[in-house]
Image (tube, helix red, strand yellow):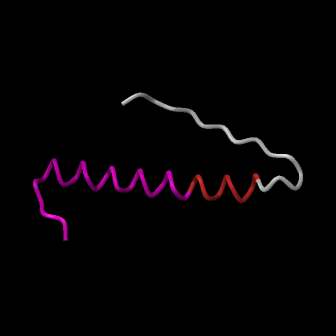
């Protein structure tokens, strides 16, 4: 998988802080799902 760098800039009143928080939440969820997938593959467990 290729590594990606995402940058978010903002200006006053643009909503950049909100967008940054939302992107961070989505990336964390994606990362956690990936970790659970790796765990499942490594230990061959069933999802509950």
Q: Residue furthest left?
A: 44
Q: Which residue reaches farthest front?
A: 14
Residue 15's x, y, as percent? Answer: 78, 56
Residue 40 is covered by the magenta coloring: yes
Q: Where does residue 5 sit, x and y in percent of width and height?
A: 56, 33
Q: Residue furthest right?
A: 12
Give me the residue at 12% from left, 60% from top: 45
Q: Could you tell me which quadrant the C terminus lies in?
A: bottom left
Q: Which residues are magenta?
A: 25-48
Name the residue at 65% across, 58% down: 21
Q: Nearer the viewer, residue 16 or 42?
A: 16
Q: Is residue 2 above or below residue 26?
A: above
Is residue 29 inside the magenta stretch?
yes
Relative image position of residue 43 (x, y in whole percent)? 12, 53
Q: How many numbered marks appear?
A: 0
Task: Report the side of 40 relative to 10 (left or right).
Answer: left
User: Which residue is found at the position 89% from the left and 52% from the top?
Assistant: 12
The quadrant of the image that shows the N terminus is: top left
Residue 10, image quadrant: top right
Report the residue that reaches farthest toward the top: 2
- Residue 46: x and y, percent? 13, 63
Q: Is residue 39 left or right of residue 31?
A: left
Q: Residue at coordinates 25% horizontally, 52% vertically from top-left? A: 37
Please identify the dominant SS of the magenta region.
Answer: helix
């Amino acid at each position: 998988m290729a590594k990606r760098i995402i940058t978010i800039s903002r200006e006053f009143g643009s909503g950049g802080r909100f967008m940054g928080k939302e992107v961070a939440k989505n990336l964390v969820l994606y990362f956690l799902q990936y970790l659970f997938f790796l765990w499942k593959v490594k230990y061959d467990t069933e999802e509950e």
